[in-house]
Amino acid sequence: MLTSRKSLTAALSFFIVAGLTAVPVFGDVLVSNLGSPYRSTSPVGNPEFWCAQSFSYTGGGPWQLDSIQAGIRDGLGPPDVVAELRSSTATLEIDNSAAGLIATFTAPDLSGPAAPRTFLPDSLVTLLPDTLYWFTLGTNTGTFGWDYADDNLSTGFGSLGNYADSSDAGATWTIGGNDFPYFIQVNSSIPEPSAVFAVATASGTILVLRRRRKP
């Protein structure tokens, strides 16, 4: 399983600043293990069995979450996917409360052989340093497989943490440790400092930033 990575390559996403022109941003891979060797696959669905993978990064400023890619295969049903980004509790477990839900995602077609599938957040998400996040996948109906790696290596400026599994559709989770994490790549972006400064100077404050998506 292969993916290309370029540090600070130009991204095709923009911050749309209220009433102003689009401000270009630069994309980067926060963390990825898509290049690691394949070990096995966890079935997701039926619909009780759900899976999750955590990630974080240390130091620096906030980053905008552009997308999350996961190593998925053999979607059948087709699956009615539940994809969420959740915060962690004080004990670094998945926060299942209403306040713990950070974002939901639009899922792509999951049918066919193993491949990185891109999940797009349904709202603007700002990631913060020194914060543990959980990407969770489940289904209401249908099934698919989420592959996991045969090592613990990753690239990017972030890191992968524990994975977790649920046998009751995400009501409770069992932490599985950090060996053999699920295949995942977190894609993020950050505006040029000069552009942010210009917006702040023009408006007196940073206004709400909204990402433009392709139709």
Image: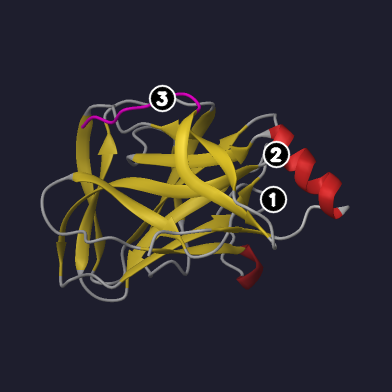
Q: How many marks?
A: 3
From mark 2 to mark 3, how far is it between C-alphas? 22 Å
**Helix, strand or loop at mark 3:** loop
Question: In the drawing, does residue 199 fall left or right of residue 170?
Answer: right
Q: Nearer the viewer, residue 197 or 115?
A: 197
Instruction: Look at mark 1 in the image and give the residue it sits on.
Output: 90
Residue in the picture at 15% in, 59% down = 111
What are the residue bounds of the magenta stretch?
Answer: 1-8
Q: Check residue 6 in the rendering and tell me which mark sits there, or answer none.
A: 3
Residue in the picture at 41% in, 48% down = 68
Q: Earlier in the sequence, mark 1 or mark 3?
A: 3
1 vs 2, front mark:
2
Residue 47 placement: quadrant = bottom left
Residue 178, above or below 199: above
Residue 185 placement: quadrant = top left
Residue 194, above or below 164: above
> Which amino acid type corresponds to the residue marked 3 in the rendered image?
Lys
Residue 36 placement: quadrant = top left
Quadrant the C terminus occupies: bottom left
Residue in the picture at 34% in, 34% down = 180
Q: Position of residue 114 (x, y in %)?
A: 16, 45
> Which amino acid type corresponds to the residue marked 1 in the rendered image?
Ala
**Helix, strand or loop at mark 1:** loop
* Residue 70 in view here: yes
Quadrant the N terminus occupies: top left
Q: Would you say the residues marked 2 and 3 are in contact, meaning their CB atoms lie under 8 Å apart?
A: no
Q: Position of residue 113 (x, y in %)?
A: 11, 48
Residue furthest out toward the right: 204
Instruction: Look at mark 2 in the image and give the residue it sits on.
Output: 195
Q: Position of residue 164 (x, y in %)?
A: 42, 50
Q: Earlier in the sequence, mark 1 or mark 2?
A: 1
